[in-house]
Amino acid sequence: MTLRRLLGGLVAVLVLGAFTAAVASAVRSSIDGEDTPPVLAGPTGPAVGALPVAPRVAAPPILAAPVPAARRVRPKKPPVVRVPAPVRPSRALGRPNRGRLADGVLFPAEGSDVTTWDAVLQATPNRDWRRVGTDRLVRTILTVAADYRRAHPGAPRVVVSDLSLPQGGRFGPEYGGLGHASHQNGLDVDIAYPRRDRREIGIGRVGEINRPLAQALVDAFVAAGAEFVFVGPRTGLRGPSNVQALENHDGHMHVRLPNVR
Ligand SMILES: [Zn+2]
């Protein structure tokens, strides 16, 4: 057999194969392409027999028109804020009512579980120079807020107010409002009680407090190792001996961490 005849035979086989496939494809498409069921046996002709039924292939999805990049990347929820590890651990110097703060960390303006409230301007977020604390205080607030929100789905974010000034020190009425006797070495934070109307702003009167959620938040800070939690005498909030009633705290709780190194 010459090479030419061999190639001729090969081409014939390929053509026949292609023809057979085309016929099978035509039969299948006549079955699957229409809504009406196929007629398998003609009224006059012999029964065709069961044709192999190809699996129905879903129509390719209609591709949505491309969305502009700016709309596609915009997150619906505020991003989760992670506190970068400080170069050096913060140092709380002296005492809360007479002290300083070294290597403090800025508390985020807001995050997935927290927002901040400027009690002087009655605005959100709180000004950044009012929210600096030790890295441990910042991390503790964020951890407690995340755990609390996981335990209470649907609770509004934790509304965080003043921590300390960037270098700590006196934080009196010269900075607005009543000022703070303590909040001097990065271990104190004021936190507005959760509101019954779920708004993420400060409290004006005790009737606005969501008492069960506020108690849960007090309990969470106690469990996280707070040295003291001061609460307003008219809030009805309670706890172990380090949860103490203090005037001017009916709108917010004051959490103080112990000074451990
Ligand atoms: Zn305070």
Image: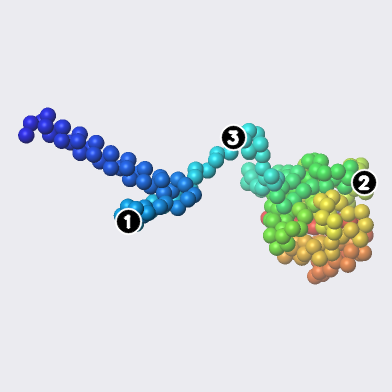
The residue most toward the top is 4
Local crowd size for mark 3, using a 10 Å CA cut-off: few (<14), some (14–19), many (≥20) = few
In the image, farthest residue toward the left: 1
Q: Position of residue 52 (x, y in %)?
A: 35, 54
Could you say which quadrant of the image residue 105 lies in? top right
Q: Secondary structure at mark 2?
A: loop
- Asked if labels 3 and 2 touch by Cβ distance under 8 angstroms, the answer is no
Q: Determine whether, in the image, residue 208 is placed left or right of residue 43.
A: right
Residue bearing mark 1 = 47
Q: Position of residue 134 (x, y in %)?
A: 72, 49
The image's mark for residue 66 is 3
Q: Count numbered badges in the picture.
A: 3
Residue under the point 38% across and 47% down? 28
Mark found first going from the N terminus, 2 or 1: 1
Q: Position of residue 106 (x, y in %)?
A: 73, 44
Amino acid tagged 3: Pro
Is the image coloured rainbow, by chain, by secondary structure, or in one colour? Answer: rainbow
How many C-alpha atoms fall within 10 Å of the one at disc 1: few (<14), some, or many (≥20)? few
Mark 2, residue position: 177
Viewer-nearest residue: 260 or 210 = 210
Q: Amino acid at mark 2?
A: Gly
Q: Amino acid at mark 1?
A: Ala
